[in-house]
Amino acid sequence: MGEVASFKYVSRKRRVREDRRFVAGQATYVSDVTPPGTRHAAVLTSPYASARIVKIDAAEALAMPGVHTVLEGRELAAATDPLLIGVDAPLVKRYPLAVGRARYAGEWVAAVVAETRALAEDAREKIRVAYEELPFVLDAEAAYGPESVPVHPKHGSNVLLDRRFVWGEVEAAFAAAPHTLSYRVKWGRSATVPIETFGVVASWDAWREMLDVWASIQMPKFADQIARALRVAANGVRVHQDVDVGGSYGVKRGIKHTVLAGFLSRKLGAPVKLIEDRLENMRGGDMHGPERIFDVELAFDGTGLVQAMRMRALDNVGAYAGRSPLQLGKPVGAIVGPYRIEAVAYHAIAVTSNKTPQEAVRGFGQAPTNYAIETGLDRVAETLGLDRLEVRRRNFIRADEFPYLIPSGTTYDSGDYHAVVAKTVKHVGWDALLAERARLRAAGRLAGIGVASCLEPSGANSSFEPLLNPKNTTTTWMESCRVMVDALGAITLTIHTTSAGQGHETLAATAAGETLDIDPDRIRVVRATSLESLPSNSPVGSRMAIMLGGAAFRAGQKLRDKLLAIAAHRWGMPAAQLHYRNGGVEDPGTGRALEWPDLVLIAHRHYHLMPPDMEPGLAVSHVMQVPTGGSLPSPDGRIQMYPCFSFEFHVVLVSIDPEIGKPYIHRYVVGHDCGTVINPDIVRGMTLGGIAHGLGAALLEEFAFDGEGQLLTQSFMDYLLPSAHEVPEVEIVHHVTPSPHTVFGQKGSGESGYLGAPAAISGAINDAVRPLGIRFEALPIRISAIGDAIARAKGLP
Amino acid sequence: MRVELQVNDRTSEVDVEPRCTLLDCLRENLGLEGTHAGCEHGVCGACTILVDGEPARSCLMLAVQADGHELTTIEGLSPGPGELSVLQDAFCETHGLQCGYCTPGMILAAHALLARTPQPTRADIVEAISGNLCRCTGYGQIVEAIALAAERLRSANLKIGET
Amino acid sequence: MKPVAFDYVRPTSISEACVLLAGDDGARVIAGGQTLIPLLAMRLARPTRLVDIARIADLAFIRDEGEGVRIGAVTRQSVAERNRIVATKLPLLAKALPWVGHQATRHRGTVGGSIANGDPAGEIPLVAVTLQATITAQDATGSTELAAGEFYLGPMISALPEGAIVTHIRFPVWQQGRTGAGFHEVSARRSDFAFVASAAQVALDADGVCTALSVGIGGAGDTPVRLGAVSETLVGSRLEETEVQEAVVAASANVETVDDLHASAAYRKRVAATLACRAILEARDEAAGAPHAR
């Protein structure tokens, strides 16, 4: 690709302005919002994985002082519409509270509202529920079978989604290939588990017929879905988007919580606050991530070139469908990873079971898929006795092949995978790394190197929705920004979404500042409520650098054009002959200039000097569609999905004390190319944080269930999040291959690190234990499993 | 029950149930909402405050146990409205946070470390924050913030808390 | 996660505390609260009254009694961790203390609280059992002394009488020869509950022959356990690695281990033996004054 452009503000060190309020403890999280008269809710959950709700007796609870109401499922379902699901399964109905049946242990069966949360919990204990236990299914393969007990009997089976795609001559490639191999890997059920749980405050104003909502939310079209479910006007819900969200990384979709709180508020005529406690969150917050079994076959030649892939992905969604079955669709947009695999058969299956439902998790299914693909590349190398790096190099799409169309219909915008790998390998000092591995082995440890080369699709052209559900013909994926200059020349930019620490205020100001040639610190950024917002789609799919950056840039351009037009009209010259700089306009021929204050004055006060038909003032906005978006899938299931593809290449050195089995990471290096970086500190933070998430998924975290469908990891005592001790120092090697689709060449980086770390860490452990003939094929890889496998291989007890 | 609490050098009397945690008391009775609830069972550290200068989990204390101690919350670290201490500013400089939810507890743990060990090694820093879970940053830029603060205090010949 | 409602009282003496406990079946002791409060939050503990003993001055002390060190029950773990008597006279406890929870929990948690709680993976109970400490408990009728080896009956189940308070714990101080200590633990994350831990103390004479040895295993089964047979076998030897391994493997053959999500029974059993060997060898090397070999 060409020269990387030089920017004034973009790519330069700049403090993230939001940090100021956080380090002072002056942020506003939903828990900090307490309108006058607020009442507090708690939920009663099902103890059984599957049960008929025979009777709910709330008399004793209602009699307690300070208790306002107890709500059960039937009343709520009669007054609201079921929550929307992404796949075409209308008989898989879902309401915030169970109706007649509980379908997982932890499902919300009743809600209590009281003066305080403690009183609500006291009252909750007094609610007597009679259940009749029913059969249940927990295992995905069992649920896929026709004999399994349907979680939703009216739907007829446990299959929510069962689609086969064939792109290219798969059968012929397998028939002709000199080699084939097959394997199974399992991605254990984990999730991003933010430190702040989900919470919502809902306040119904009967006089204005408006529901005010404050929530720890990351959900596109949140207001619409609440309005629809509560059967109020779409503009009868006002979401306050200036609530700080304490981490989400996908999971905080909050529809059931908000519908419940909104209904309760309307019923009681008072604000209702529902903050999940950690137990409610883990078990019944419906924030689990993919639980996926991959069966993969590869066809390859003697040099390690992979010609075709068959992949079956079976996901255990849990008792209801939220966004989660669609997480089988997003990977279609990068189904071959960074490789030139020409034929792919993809079989995507989502099944219900009597487990906690899933929600969207960082990467939306790409991290598990990358784990499956990278396992395959390692197996190819192993089968042929070739170096794993070399096999990857041979299979990489080459820099001169971009834009590159993959079999499933998506075009990768740009990349230079060989360059990133070369840079990273050089930084690592490959020979020294090999020597270090040898030294560790000689000292009696098991030692291994893992590599993973993965794509991060970014931009969220979420065309997996129409792909997996032809009844959904959505092709609009937009973002917006408004820039206003007031009569005194101060600049205010509004954004139309919530944020969870991604630094969007700084991002938008930087993008606008770059195009306006004005220091971003002069641009104040505020958030509109949903009612004052232009169309937005929330920070999902690693999209905001591309979309908010793009919208802010375009809005800035419009403002700049307006200023040029004002000056042009003032001087009676074509705007094209004038030069804009630092907020002012100069006539290069004569040197005369109209500076910012002059132009602001004209725009706001001197209508007689304005170009004819120009709107007074200086207010501009831009609503932008995702680049390359706007088309529906072809009949054979090909579709352009996300516009931009970042690339990451992980190298991990691990050693294990064979008697203990605990992996220790000696070195972690990642090569990262997300195109032009708008804010270096933000991008670095995303990558480091993503790797920590990935480490957790690989080694520590699992929502494990017992045979009765009870969640074993209900609290942080058993669901283990990595601490500062567990996360190694990570070295990041940068490369920039700009995207041709974006205003600065930026790509997304919100999911970086997470998409490749599990594959790399798993690969390193497998490299370490391979001399003993051991192979780990499921995540997380626990210490005990490693220790026991080593002992078995050595014939020890 | 009435309890007299000394928080950020100010004495307040609150009336709370014995079952009220110090965390909930700080937030709801004293309006100090910078201390956060992450798990309410003593693992995540988001509720960390200083008790007599040492880090403690406020969700693992009852308000009625907290009298007679000097309690410090994040609000007590800012020198004045709109002003940041050297440590707080260092977190801004290295971007040692994203969503900010774990940040107050993290900063207080760091503050206690620097009071005890003005020149901490990387291992000292990691140990000091190992009881504070962060899901955003992967800890790298947090460790850098604390090291930067230590260096800035050293070169300005200041002790933590003097800024 | 809000607790049930309860009363709170703060007696100023041990006897007053005992009277309060005797008078109310639903009353429970609170000291550091680091274990109790999570149980309260989850409503697994549902007391009617909490009797707060944390500020009873008579219960907070660390005394060098020559042949033993006596630690008052409400001594904070962090105080013990920084204490010179503990560092010099109880090197095994000194080694174990940094592994107990996190710094923040050690500032509040107490030595007696950990002893009374009896978590099978608890480091302080393991050291108490390994060193054959004596636990003193007091109730309304008087004081009893219980041997640590007979104190733990099951996970969180102890021989502490109903309505009694642990008042102090006496750890014997080995008088003879050169003493060394070793402590090893495996957990998923540093500072988690141990899957398995081992504590060992060794005394060598001037020629490097073992004159005393004690090793214990925690986290593996329902209670911490001292492997007495290992002492019997290895006292009088030079503690060569192979003979240590043989003795440990033989002694741990019948130790029942727990199987759970985090570690299998086989893992715990096998690694308990590994850690016990390492702890003994570390203690041996420390006693010999040499740097630890492994």
Image (cartoon, rainbow, N blue to C red):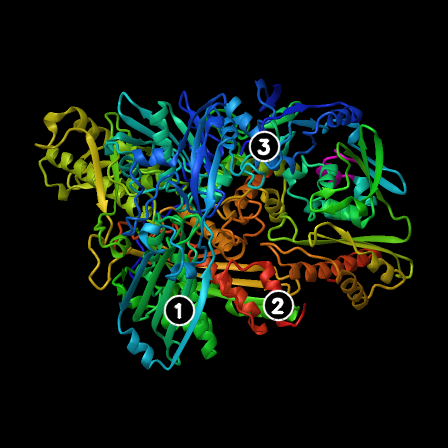
| Residue plotted at (24% across, 54% down) | A466
Question: Which mark, by number, is residue A790?
Answer: 2
Q: Is residue C277 left or right of residue A264?
A: right
Q: Residues within 10 Å of mark 2 (few under 14, many from 20)?
A: many
Position of A188 with respect to B21 (left or right) is left
Mark number displayed over residue B58: 3
Task: Identify the amino acid type marked 1.
Answer: Val
User: Is A409 in front, or is C159?
Assistant: C159
The type of residue carrying mark 2 is Ile
Q: Are marks 1 and 2 in contact (CB under 8 Å)?
A: no
Residues rendered magenta in the picture? C72-83
The mark total stands at: 3
Task: Indicate the quadrant where residue A399 lies.
Answer: bottom left
Tell me how far mark 1 sits from mark 3, CA to CA: 49 Å
Q: Earlier in the sequence, mark 1 or mark 2?
A: 1
Discs 1 and 2 carry the same chain letter? yes
The x and y percentages for residue C273 are 73, 61
**In the image, residue C24 above or below residue C35:** above
In front of the other: A413 or B67: B67
> Where does label 1 land, which residue?
A296
Query: In screen coordinates, is C211 left or right of A750?
Result: right
Distance between mark 3 and mark 2 Cα atoms: 42 Å
Mark 3, chain letter? Answer: B
Estimate the x, y position of residue A71 in percent, counting from the top left. 40, 31
User: Secondary structure under badge 2?
Assistant: helix
Image spot of residue A109 (x, y percent):
43, 38
Q: Are marks 1 and 3 in contact (CB under 8 Å)?
A: no
Q: Helix or strand or loop: what does disc 1 sit on? A: strand
